[in-house]
Amino acid sequence: MANLFKIAIRNLARYRRRTILTSSLIAIGVIFVLLFVGVSGSFKNMMIGQMTDSMLGHIQVHRKGYMASIDNLPLTMNMKPQAVKKLEKVFQDIPDVESYSPRIKFGGMLSTFTETTNIRLNGVYPEKEMKTLPLLASRISNGGKEIRKGEIIIPELLSRGMKINVGDIVVVIATNKDGSVNGKQLKVSGIIESVTGPGGRDGYVHIEDAMEILRMEEMEISEIAVRLRDFGKLHSVYNTLNTLLSGELNKQGKPAFEVHTWESLSPFYNIARSIDFMTIFIKAMLTAIVLISVMNVMIMAVYERIREIGTIAAIGTMPGKILSMFVTEGVLLGIIGAIAGNIIGTGLVYLLKVVKITFNFGRQSGLVLSPYVTLYDIVMISLIVTIVAVIGSLQPAFKASRMEPIKALRHV
């Protein structure tokens, strides 16, 4: 085996220019794949982080059937205190759950005494909400970053349209599940930006104010947002929650709860999937580059060395040995290109991270791109290059091993 590598290295050195050009082409393909994987992966993770850490949470739990009519924010589909206690006990028993935040979601009217418009409100426990959504505070552009009793954080859309400023007094009017109307004066303590664009009518109040507005005798929760310690265990925890809650049935004997990951709650999941598909496409292009490059070089190598092949076959070299010799040359070309591409590509990814490129996502500005590549990415790309180099070498190598010695020696 060592002799095969020595012969392959010597033959590649004989055609130095061709070897350098082919290895460079493979290296360039590897570099571009690493750059795309690093940058796209960073952007995808940042986009997911903005959605989960400032609005959705990683997982949400609702009463069964709530999501089917969530556009109407039905108060009749809220979870009773007993159900909430069961869920809290389940969350506390799962080590991967870092925090959770119960919410009362309801629609109402916002009035400045001169103008009135509709608004969607989230009644939350401030400490739990901020812990579950660590980026929520960064969306509050004016005023304080806290959600206090007697105060309201209104969306930027309504602030601009109705000329509401921090410190103004507004009235929130809502209809409870029994159909009665109630209102409460609140002080505007902050303006919150939308994650995805200039639209958005979601504001925040303290959960006790929400109970008062809705005249709740006991706290009924619309949803519970959950944050995990390790986002990579999202589907594992989701499956665990589904298993643990599947035994909880309502009076009709049907499941009492439904569990959703952020993927089923946000249309941005489709963008994340598109990035994954693009990564697969880029890797397919790398495969094509390596395959065509190695095959072209090996075909030329076989054509130019027909008499040499005839000589080594005439002195008794077995066809399998000849095939191995040419395959080894192709593998070495792939390995050289992969090593050079990995070194340069990893260096460029690190350079981009040091430069700290900024961009805007939705209403969030100044987000810093932090591209990275993992050891898994490097190993997988190297394996792809090596395997494709072997495949690209097989046909020319097989042709060389099947040559008749006498015909090959007569070749001019």
Image: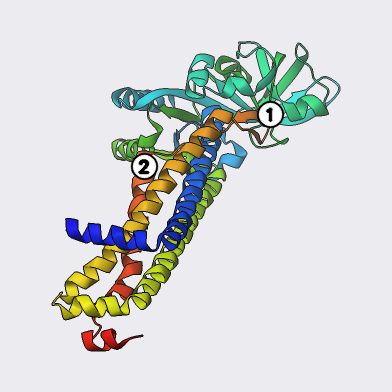
Occupied quadrant, residue 113: top right
Tell me: 177 left or right of 100. right
**Residue closer to the observer: 258 or 322:** 322
Amino acid type at image mark 1: Gly
Q: Position of residue 148 (x, y in %)?
A: 61, 11
For mark 2, does the 10 Å Cα neighbourhood hold few (<14), some (14 to 19), or many (20 or more) residues? Answer: some
Question: Which quadrant holds the C terminus?
Answer: bottom left
Residue 120 visible here? no
Identify the residue at image location x=58%, y=29%: 356
Q: Position of residue 287 (x, y in %)?
A: 42, 61
Q: Is residue 173 above or below residue 281?
A: above
Q: Position of residue 71 (x, y in %)?
A: 61, 41
Q: Secondary structure at mark 2?
A: loop
Separation of marks 1 and 2 at Cα, in angstroms: 30 Å
Q: Secondary structure at mark 1?
A: strand
Q: Which residue is mark 1?
A: 108
For mark 1, does the 10 Å Cα neighbourhood hold few (<14), some (14 to 19), or many (20 or more) residues? Answer: many
Q: Is residue 332 above or below residue 150?
A: below
Q: Which residue is mark 2?
A: 255
Q: Is residue 14 above or below residue 403?
A: above
Question: Which quadrant holds the N terminus?
Answer: bottom left
Instruction: Please tell me the numbered disc located at residue 166.
Output: none
**Residue closer to the observer: 55 or 317:** 317
Q: Position of residue 195 (x, y in %)?
A: 63, 33
Identify the residue at image location x=73%, y=27%: 156
Tell me: 152 left or right of 355. right
Amino acid type at image mark 2: Pro
* Of pointers 1 and 2, the one earlier in the residue sequence: 1
Residue 198 visible here? yes
